[in-house]
Image (cartoon, rainbow, N blue to C red):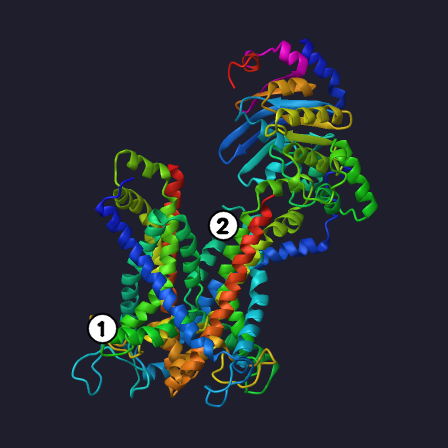
Amino acid sequence: MSESQKAVAEARNDVKMETRNVNIFYGANQAIRDVDLDITDRSVTALIGPSGCGKSTYLRALNRMNDTIHSCRVEGRILLDGENIYDRGVDPVEVRRRVGMVFQKSNPFPKSIFDNVAFGLRIGGEKDKDVIAQRVEESLKGAALWDEVKDRLQSSALGLSGGQQQRLCIARCLAVWPEVILMDEPASALDPLATAKIEELIRELRERYTIVIVTHSMQQAARVSDFTAFFYMGELVEYGKTDMMFTRPTKKRTEEYISGRFG
Amino acid sequence: MRPRRAKSKLESSFRTPLWHRIAERAIAVLALAAIAAIALIFIFIAREAVPMLWEAEFAEEVQIRDLFFAKEWKGYDEPVFVWQPVGEPAKFNVMPLFVGSLKVTLLAMLMSIPLGVGCAMFIALYAPRAVREVVKPAIELLAGIPSVVLGFFALMVIASWAQATFGFHFRLNAVVAAIGLALTIVPVIFTISEDAIQAVPNTLTEAALALGARKYQVALRIVVPAALPGIAAGVVLGFGRAIGETMIVLMASGNAAIMELFDFTTIVRTVTATIAAELGEVAQGDPHWRVLFLLGVMLFAVTFVLNILGDVIIQRLQKRLTASS
Amino acid sequence: MRHTKQDWLLAGLTGVSLAVILLLLAVLLGQIFWHGAPVISAQFLTESPGADMISGGIWPAIYGTVFMTLLMTIAGVPVGIATAIFLSEYASPRSRIAKAVRIAVNNLAGVPSIVFGLFGLGFFIIFVGGGVDALLYDDPRPVWGKPSILWASLTLAVLTLPVVIVTTEEALRTVPRELRDASLALGATRFQTVYKIVLPNAKGGILTGVILAVSRGAGEVSPIIFCGAANFLPYLPTDLRDMFMHLGYHVYALATQSPNVDAARPTLFGTVLVLLVLTFSLNLLAVIIRSRSRAALRP
């Protein structure tokens, strides 16, 4: 048993999500082939790989966002705390309340900052104004945005800068108290300064949430993640502790990719 | 036997209000309204026409073959096509009406195809931005004018002008009605043609220009041929609109059912105008009533086919353009 | 680029076709305004027509047109919007039912308006109205099974349905997919997403489409000729079963059936002008809302 696998095994008893024999199809095309992967609780797992390798598709399977694409079909089992989220009788809405998502392009609603963050609470049936106000504040603080927006909560979210918008989307996600947060290249559209802020935030959030992040930047993966999974052509090539992966990859493909020989 | 699982945390917690579920059901049911409407239209028009096949009252007065074929009526010395519902006996030959509809429609198409396509070409190829931004709303405006207003315009203004200019024997005739009709069809042809011309990829025109083609050569040899299916779709849909248009022909065509194929300056009576003008004065279930509904069924069938045809052409075009880009 | 003679010729020919259309439009509007405007007076707009149909005003026709248009909107627009929501938000684009609905909508849009008139007569008046009468009354005199403002409005609601559906669907499609994804990812149900995110963001476009459809319905005459429009009716419809006067129908009747068309000319032009102003102001309203809602989507 290699050292990295041992490290993974140690963490096993703290698995938040497991995927078993996951295959994903778009119509007749197979986008993901037989992926087995464990996602450790309260840690950051990075999914890396060249574009088109299926990492985003896989990510969207973890909270059933692929359900919204009519041609997409998911096979295999994806367990959240031991329960298969693709079982019959599972309500995808419940899955998504526990597994939140932050998208590549920041997508605030054309509403006020406050209403953006409160949206998830209100649709969840929360009516108490004080509870909502408190949760909004707490979430904005959690996303390190509170100090910048506390004086203009009622102004439009579209007036924020790109980086602020993305942190607002994170705050909006935190407000529904998810257990897992999926992030699909959350900083790819941002400048370096805003990116640094998001990365810092991710490191803080790790204390309380399980985070899965797709990124095309290996430096970013190295900076923020505890575990890294390398995808290539729809398959999971290698998985391990991030520091091990980047210093001593076991597979040739991983090494080639990490050293920048293709991508 | 497996023990029953405890209720999962992932099962629906039913916190969505009841009215959401009711509204979703309603949406799914109401979405079928369009299908129901098409079916009901056909069924309930046909229901008033079809009894002609077995009703004794109808058979007494009209023979079905006389609806379509010429007959030598008493007092005539040759077989003729006549629509004369109040004659004695009543004569219901639909051919003069079809001829009237086709004549007016063809004339209107002859005017509106060059006008519509010409406008579209000018706007897409030559017009400066400022002109385009005035013309497009103007044509939308034209498309928004109720047809009774266009009919009124044809009846009051165009008819007098045309008679003074061309010296028509009849003040109201096929030409006048066709001019009125053209006003409703030009926007249809213009809009669809303009879309089709704009959709021709820039790379195509640039390639031709780079080869040293003149602008008119690019227009006539590259752009128009590439947009031809779209223009054809516009023409087909415009034809469907023209043949089904009622108020304009009712007001401006003179409304006498004359079986005259070639002289375009005679009074005509179209299928649509016949229905509009006569149905109000017929008793329900009368043979005349049945024949008028039969005209409706035929009109419905013709436009149905034309619409499907137009759609197929547009879809082909879209497929071709998306496949190539 | 240097233009050759052929270039000028083509530009000239196509330009002439445009000029012809614009000229016709200008003459049309000019004539109607020129001859119509002097007729318009408070009296013309608020009084009932005299017994000769020429003297007096056209108030019952204005009232009837507006009343019918409102009824038509109430009956047709919700159905159209629901269909558009179904097509854009619920149905898979490849599903058979969505395809069937789309084909039906396209064909419905192409059905000649006079055929809608036959439909209104055959279905609403004879089948539905006559059916209700047969069920409820022994009296051979029709109560529901006769032309009325209700049946005319319902017929026009069916006629405008495809316009509402197509324009609403277009408006729904302008809402970015990202917003739907964001809402769903926060645990919103599909209906919550539609109701809280998609509809509020598309409401400008939907309103525009609805108004355009309504303005088309308001001016249609041929479907209502035998479904409820009355030649001459000096009183206002107060009951859904009443017949009604309609601006467009009034123009048709006066222009073709009046014994003295020359005497009717001013009244005719005045009535046409009122009808045009009514439909154009609806169109104008639609254009304004459209440009405003486009501006609002930008940050």
Identify whether C153 is placed above or below A29. below
Position of the N terminus of chain C, as image quadrant, is top left
The answer to which quarter of the image holds residue A62 is top right
Query: Can see residue A10?
Result: yes
The residue drawn where x is 53% and y is 25% is A51
Residues in magenta, as a range: A234-253
Identify whether A84 is placed above or below B269. above
The picture places residue B36, in percent across and down from the top left corner, at 51, 62
Q: For the residues labelled 2 and 1, say whether their Cβ atoms are less than 8 Å apart.
A: no
The picture places residue A64, in percent across and down from the top left corner, at 64, 36
Q: Does the magenta segment cover residue C146? A: no
Look at label 2 and name its amino acid: Arg
- Residue B166, which numbered label? 1
Q: Nearer the viewer, residue B206 or A67?
A: B206
The residue drawn where x is 51% and y is 62% is C284
The answer to which quarter of the image holds residue A180 is top right
